[in-house]
Amino acid sequence: MNIPFGGAKGGVVCNPKELSRGELERMTRRYTSEIINEIGPEKDIPAPDVGTDGTVMAWIFDTYSMNKGHSVLGVVTGKPLNVGGSLGRLEATARGCLYTIQEAVRKKEKRLEGLTVAVQGFGNVGSFLARFLAEEGAKVVAVSDSSAGLYNPKGIDVPAALAHKQETGTLRGLRGADEITNEELLLVDCDVLAPCALEQVITQDNADKIKASIICEGANGPITPTADEILDDRGVMILPDILANAGGVVVSYFEWVQGLQEYFWKEPEVNSKLRDIVTRAFNETWHLQQERQTSMRSAAYGVAVGRVAEATVTRGLYP
Amino acid sequence: MNIPFGGAKGGVVCNPKELSRGELERMTRRYTSEIINEIGPEKDIPAPDVGTDGTVMAWIFDTYSMNKGHSVLGVVTGKPLNVGGSLGRLEATARGCLYTIQEAVRKKEKRLEGLTVAVQGFGNVGSFLARFLAEEGAKVVAVSDSSAGLYNPKGIDVPAALAHKQETGTLRGLRGADEITNEELLLVDCDVLAPCALEQVITQDNADKIKASIICEGANGPITPTADEILDDRGVMILPDILANAGGVVVSYFEWVQGLQEYFWKEPEVNSKLRDIVTRAFNETWHLQQERQTSMRSAAYGVAVGRVAEATVTRGLYP
Amino acid sequence: MNIPFGGAKGGVVCNPKELSRGELERMTRRYTSEIINEIGPEKDIPAPDVGTDGTVMAWIFDTYSMNKGHSVLGVVTGKPLNVGGSLGRLEATARGCLYTIQEAVRKKEKRLEGLTVAVQGFGNVGSFLARFLAEEGAKVVAVSDSSAGLYNPKGIDVPAALAHKQETGTLRGLRGADEITNEELLLVDCDVLAPCALEQVITQDNADKIKASIICEGANGPITPTADEILDDRGVMILPDILANAGGVVVSYFEWVQGLQEYFWKEPEVNSKLRDIVTRAFNETWHLQQERQTSMRSAAYGVAVGRVAEATVTRGLYP
Amino acid sequence: MNIPFGGAKGGVVCNPKELSRGELERMTRRYTSEIINEIGPEKDIPAPDVGTDGTVMAWIFDTYSMNKGHSVLGVVTGKPLNVGGSLGRLEATARGCLYTIQEAVRKKEKRLEGLTVAVQGFGNVGSFLARFLAEEGAKVVAVSDSSAGLYNPKGIDVPAALAHKQETGTLRGLRGADEITNEELLLVDCDVLAPCALEQVITQDNADKIKASIICEGANGPITPTADEILDDRGVMILPDILANAGGVVVSYFEWVQGLQEYFWKEPEVNSKLRDIVTRAFNETWHLQQERQTSMRSAAYGVAVGRVAEATVTRGLYP
Amino acid sequence: MNIPFGGAKGGVVCNPKELSRGELERMTRRYTSEIINEIGPEKDIPAPDVGTDGTVMAWIFDTYSMNKGHSVLGVVTGKPLNVGGSLGRLEATARGCLYTIQEAVRKKEKRLEGLTVAVQGFGNVGSFLARFLAEEGAKVVAVSDSSAGLYNPKGIDVPAALAHKQETGTLRGLRGADEITNEELLLVDCDVLAPCALEQVITQDNADKIKASIICEGANGPITPTADEILDDRGVMILPDILANAGGVVVSYFEWVQGLQEYFWKEPEVNSKLRDIVTRAFNETWHLQQERQTSMRSAAYGVAVGRVAEATVTRGLYP
Amino acid sequence: MNIPFGGAKGGVVCNPKELSRGELERMTRRYTSEIINEIGPEKDIPAPDVGTDGTVMAWIFDTYSMNKGHSVLGVVTGKPLNVGGSLGRLEATARGCLYTIQEAVRKKEKRLEGLTVAVQGFGNVGSFLARFLAEEGAKVVAVSDSSAGLYNPKGIDVPAALAHKQETGTLRGLRGADEITNEELLLVDCDVLAPCALEQVITQDNADKIKASIICEGANGPITPTADEILDDRGVMILPDILANAGGVVVSYFEWVQGLQEYFWKEPEVNSKLRDIVTRAFNETWHLQQERQTSMRSAAYGVAVGRVAEATVTRGLYP
């Protein structure tokens, strides 16, 4: 994404669901204390992933800050809004998907308005993506959650689906659409398919039956390598996860910047800056893909690895 | 105001008017030296109040910076412009009053243009407020300073009043208006009354005679608690000081942010960001006031206390 | 320029052209190590000058950062883009010249469009300046590099000249213009003359033959003091180097600010902020020049020295 | 005492006896966290006083050290031996008393061996002092604790008294001595009287009945100012508390030095260094007392205040 | 050993013998740079072990010091004498063995003078130990190196053996003693046996044939657990390695202390302090062994684990 | 001297005698403030030289300490005793001379007792040296100050000379000795000559007339290079200044160590440690002188340069 914000993973081997809130807090604070020399606004900046959430980030922030003697907003991202989180972070991944789809459609010299879309998953990514796409004029023909899929070739009423989900906790039972399975959703007739739920849902078994000409990987790794090849041969444009769903990380970066500046941006500003970065990254990928006549996925890796390599050569190895 | 910038007070027991400039400077530098571990851009950030001014802030800034070995702009606010102060800070409190009055008028579904206003006090707050209100089209029917009040139901020529004050040091003698007392000013017929001079000028003695339907507390505490109740019962909308005159603190916060970023904003940018923050704070207060059917003052305290309480719960108590 | 970014010079006595790349790197890293307590984002911030370049800055950045244990973007400016440089830095000096010329023309109540310009030098400053002036509608009647000058009173095709220079490494041989010498270039009939190559090219020998009414010092010191007096007496408006070619330093300052904020600006934003600062500086100089009835050069020094003196008085001398 | 180790007091308003161990630990850690910028091996170094003990010091040490990321032995004194305490600290105050008595006896050109001594109090100061005096050959004719006093003009068997106290928790019931009250103890016939229990036990009521010619203030303030004058007039040599019972502070200082050096002294080394310092302080006081013909108490204050004044003049006042 | 100096191991997976000196130096400096936040005089202090030596320590010291901007003697131990090493470090392990043997002999109410000793190994530990024992009057009846063993029941001329080894690089060929194997050496008739060469040389196969009544483990782990039991049952006193050969670590600790103090001790002072610590540790072990009626080895572990446990309880667990 | 304490010089160009005390203090504090990043207990440690004294050192100490927020004893040496100076520093240079003379005499297999000595200069070095030599039993046959020289082949009464100088400010007029000039003093019949006053007093003009067989350079550079050669050829043993008068620097080093340890040594301890270091340095020089058959001066340089070279090779050059 060409932002000064790298990545790594670390954690504690435990099942947070088996810990009391008190145990979880004490463990988080002890862990923070143990790694306190390795983290910091200028070093490594934790962010939540599976098993942790905003509350855990707030504890890390508080433990670190109490240790330093003042609030250090830049030490973690994914903080709740009331202790220095960023506006727009919740919807950031979905927005990133939207912007890559918009760019992809533009490259195909089409307009998003009127295109048909199927979105698998109705969580933080899928539900917001469906809403944003509908707002932009696309026709969302299929959505699904873990309990049910819904299909209506004339378009689903997304606000109604969001409200139904909100009220009942499930998509099942929404009127004005036929029920389908999550597997069937992938194969419906649509221009854009956005698998935003689980890994490895598009495999060699169904890859040749997919009708969409653009697939946006809202989830991490929804397409197996074999399926990837099949789709590529068929000329389907795949928007790879490291590009399509990087919106969350970009807004984590924004949260860090806002913390460093002690100044917070309004939501439209966050979204606009996100769009700039996603669009730039899309186009760098696109140009490399055109130049090397390869897939978007290979091009995305090419851009990323090339950037690190180039910087390493420029800086030199020392000591 | 929902800015990451808290507040406390501290000082030296002395009468600065009895000290020579040299004594004042040495005392300021010694005091800074004594509290140097407690202040800093990430800890506690002094700002001028009664008895100190920009020059004293410059000495604090210089003492701290010489101690650290480089200029630390973020250690104090209220600095003179030539050593890192912020544009727009002088007029900031008056602007904050203006913005809250504008929002209040909007909630009453009126327009500021043509409304009648009386402004008590013609110092840093009152004179700028009168000017800004006149520029926005309001009819300023009464102004006053410590020497005299002026009243003209058809509107006072504010630029002329500013020029007269500038030249003569007093409002007394301005032509085109009747002279009144400061007490009478509070009771003139007007839509908006802005007491911007002293504490406790509106009391149980005159509260029921006030004709304005909006009172904007430009000064700190111009209304006694008893008067507050009387006015509240009468349906007068009071814009409480912690909301109405917070503009100065907000621009102190902006000065700190600019110092941290080592990048300075143009004056319109300062004003626009100030408007955003004041307007947001007004509306949060308004919504709570509506929801709880209470006064704006109670609602303002409710918002403030609620924000701190919520953040404390989120962070937890450690150690 | 009224930016919080001072200046000084330092270096190593050596001929970098006689050193191997390895020697240059080791010497740079050792030198950085020796001065490491004197430099830093809050202290002294190196930038490239004759004999050093972006690569050397990258080594300083890397040495300093490895010493501190994390990337410290703000420690040097002039870094290559892939390790934290600023967009627009390359063209910054030329843009600064453009903006001062535009302001000067405006003061003369003329429009840049249609004015004739001669630009001496076709390196980082001259070539970009010629391009920008042409894009703004000026008629570039003469350009030159170290090998040749070109003159066409009807205007030179600047994009063609840039392409020719790019391809052949020289301006010589461009069609559609007459060849002249660098000395002749200074004397051609034009409204604006921009010497952007060497020091001391306008002397008492040719000062009275210059036909331009505005001279923009793109180079450092192209006019000797004696020539300066002659031109001043003749009423030629000289845009002095400390004002006209400060664009590079200003964008160095921007690079530092972006590094501190860990957030990078898009190129139009850089240019727009540069224009604001250059225009403000021009006008402060202009006003002092008008007030004191002196030259722009004297006024520029007056503004600069006055600013430092005023800040020194405000801060006081301590200890 | 002429050691680079000053003094001040601070604390938390609470009754530690009403707190559970967990509450006491949490409160101690929070308090340490709040004052963490004020304490440290180079700043202020807490030590236990009434209401705190070695365990509380260990918590302060641990909280501070965990905050800094490594064990900081020098941050508190009075630590238990197993986390960096000093050998000999427990008996240090009593040893200090012994050394001052020995010096005083020497000035009177007598030998401690065979002198009669009465010791009031049998806690950390009195019991050790009785033991040390007996070991040095003095005849301890009276001892007491809060429950009882014992008197035997032929000398009490101190090891037996220590054993009895150890076993029964009281001196009462020890054979081979007559029971007396604490008040009577002060008036027994003896050469040296050492009140090591409570404040203000020697008053204008009993001062003229005291038979000892040397009084060693093992407790803080056992003699009232009026009694002090009476005794002084009678020619009794009073070894004042700030001199006589400073042994504990001196070994606190030694504990700090050992922590800074990360090297621990053997007990005889501690005692020998303590003797050096106490003896030097006694003699400085003695010389001033001789020179000014005043009391030992006045002389002790004179030495202390003079030392601070002299150093202040030498250093100057800055800023 | 009751010193404030813990232990851990870390390293780089490589074969230093396959690296050039330049590669070794660059790798050491890079490694130091990578772990620089984890080491330091107050954190973790490297010391040489197999595969590293004084030169490598000097590079770590230099890299760390250049990074910090001044010499930090306390960051590593085992430094060469000319960059801050300690006198007496080379012979420290052997001296530690000597002192434990002396204490053991004393407990048996014997005198070292005249006792017979066999020493296996003639490297840094064995050769110095043989020399020290001979100097103390013991009769060294057998010594060995990897090439040969020597036996003379009337005592070997140790100075001659040292000179022979020095000259020829081997013990083989020394006159005045019979040649034996390393296995035979273990079984010769002697009071004290000191295996100072390899691990696991005393096993269940030879344990019951050993004639010595005291075994001093100069090497790490020369006795297998099974052999340990056999010897214990037979009443042989084993001086376990963690006690007997800790002299090297103790003098590493001394080197650190000297570095912190910037003051260096003379060799007799080093040896005397070493003797104090080793003797104290021996006696603490001895007392626990007596109290629990267990082996010296179990007692040594008991003392060590007990000390850590006790300190942990005293400090508490935080956070 | 083999102590971890290097040397360099720096200062302010001014004549302190022309400054008022206030000017001197302010200038010292400003200078300290300017170089504050370059000095410190771990970096560069100022000490007094010509034109500065203990008071100036106290100001440096105070300025630095106030800047850091706590007393930093190790930042300067030569401090007055009441702010952390070392006992024995005043006499240290003279003591160093004494110890080198004692070693030199020993090498000649003589005893100091009864040898005749002439001492030129009666300031901090000469007067103490005369006293120490007399106390050790040498016969001081000649002394001098700037006003007069005294000679008595039977020995001068040194205590009387010290008292006379103390009382009258001059040696002139002391009874019991003949008056001579400073030039004559150098040529008197004696075993040891100690020029402790000015530079270059022994030249090619008088070198061959000197009768002493040992010359101890108490002053800096009292012997010119040519004279040095003449004396060397004549077999006179010269104790060169870098060895003979290094006692002052060694006790500066001790003052620093005591400050770091926050623990102060008694005077005999200072003297004893000084003797150890001077004696060791003498012997290292002696051995090299013997080995290389050169002068003591060359050997002293050889030892010094060799030590630095060896450490540089051991540490390597990085970066």
Image (tube, coloured by chain):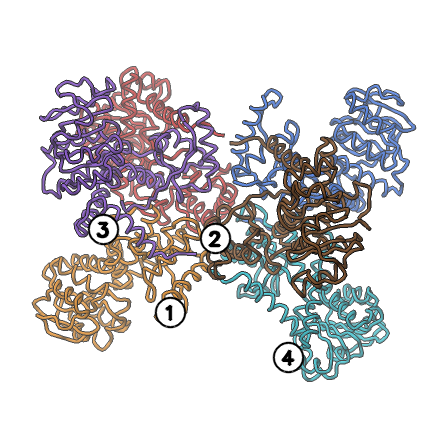
Chain colours: A brown, B cyan, C blue, D orange, E purple, F red
| Residue underneath mark 2 | A14
| Residue B79 visible in the displayed image | no
Give the number of the mark in front: 2 or 4: 2
- Residue C78 sits in which quadrant? top right
- Residue C51 sits in which quadrant? top right
**Is residue F47 shown above or below A132?**
above
CA gap between label 1 and label 2 equals: 34 Å
Give the number of the mark in front: 3 or 2: 2
| Residue underneath mark 4 | B225
Q: Amino acid at mark 3?
A: Glu
- Pointer 2 indicates a residue of which chain? A
**Residue D19: which disc?**
1
| Residue underneath mark 3 | D267
CA gap between label 2 and label 4 equals: 56 Å
Horizontal side of residue C116 vs D271, given as left or right: right
Number of other residues with Cα within 10 Å of mark 3, as a class: few under 14, some 14 to 19, many 20 or more: few
Q: Earlier in the sequence, mark 3 or mark 1?
A: 1
CA gap between label 3 and label 2 equals: 48 Å
Is B174 in front, or is B281?
Answer: B281
